[in-house]
Image (cartoon, rainbow, N blue to C red):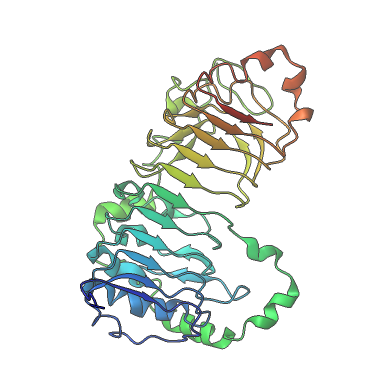
Amino acid sequence: MKRNFTTMVWKTSYCSIFYIYSGAISKLSNLIHLDVSYNRELGLCGFSNITHDLPFTQIRILRANFLHCDAGPSVTLLCEDIQPLINTSLEELYFDGNNIDFAQTGVPYYLPASLKRLTLKSNRWIQNRYTYCNILGLTNLTYLDISDMNQHQISSDEQYSFCQNLFRIINCEKLRSSLFGKTLNPRVPESCIKGCLNPGRGETFYTQTKRGGYYDETNITYPLNCSTPVPYATNVHMIFVPQNIEQIIMNNSRLGHSLTYTYFTSSNLKSLILSHNQFYSPIGPICNATKLNYLDLSNNKCSYLSAYIFSELLAVETLILDNNLIGNAQIIHDKNIRNLFSMQLQLKHLIL
């Protein structure tokens, strides 16, 4: 059999690797797919050594899931950890279950524009200024999964006995913490830094001025729809997403509680999965999601529905609302219930 060494796939998952030296992977110039997942003692120190070698390869897919033990301490993702990725043509990054709760401002800038799929599941993310920096610059990203956040908070005590590399993690974090707090890498444009420090473009989208014709959760007065200028809507939720994103999954991530005026920065979103969260009171409207055809709001303990929550989602074909408390919602006894699905002319699957 003739071997072809023009491309290379290297899988080292479940190998009990606890360290990878810098330079160990740079020799693999034909590497296109690297999987180092479930090496529970590798940590972000080992991950950082890997990323610094990847620009010397042809990497397209990187899987670096569960590099820490489940019950280990939270860690911070630094710019230095993923800075080299901007010099690659990476298309898929799987970075699940790494106990990350915070990222240094500017981190998203180093995700390459070639990235198409990104999964950050089973981490401990806290929303902060890094959430917005350069998100709109990921022009090729079509798939994003940030599910199962903060599940460590309900871990049982028995799991802690399996964290055998605790001291190695602590020593690694001490080493990396010397980098944290320094001035951002000079390669990050000044405009990006300012954008991160002032997410939402100042007050443009977050004006809280209350004017007649708008609402709060307990006293709804209509009309309020997507023609309402965003700066004048109260409690507006601007959802910053890449311009070509098609699918977002954020199930089981403790999101909620109400879902008021929501505006997506891109209209290309087709599938949105928000199941197993805490959206008790979906009010809406949900704006600029004109291509959304799949919406999953199941298992949210929803006991309140606005009659106009779905009024702007004209392309929806599948709507999943099971395992909620809709039977207790006031709308069930209200004449406005006739409006609840009145605009879903494309609807094929309704799950209650």
Where's the N terminus, which quadrant? Answer: bottom left
* Residue 105 visible in the snapshot: no
What residue sits 68% from the left and 43% below the top?
299
Q: How many labels does the image show?
A: 0
- Is residue 301 shown above or below 337? below
Image location (x, y in percent) of residue 343 = 53, 17
Residue 205 falls in image quadrant: top left
Image location (x, y in percent) of residue 291 = 42, 30
What residue sits 28% from the left and 58% below the top?
112
- Is residue 95 shown above or below 272? below
Where's the C terminus, which quadrant? Answer: top right
- Is residue 225 shown above or below 275? above
Instruction: Give left or right: position of 94 versus 90.
Output: right
**Along the line of sight, which residue is nearer the eye, 199 or 300?**
300
**Along the line of sight, which residue is nearer the eye, 9 or 148?**
9
Instruction: Give left or right: position of 227 versus 55.
Output: right
What residue sits 65% from the left and 29% below the top?
217
* Residue 14 visible in the snapshot: yes
Image location (x, y in percent) of residue 14 = 51, 79
Image location (x, y in percent) of residue 345 = 52, 18
Name the residue at the front extreme: 1
Name the residue at the top extreme: 335
Residue 91 falls in image quadrant: bottom left
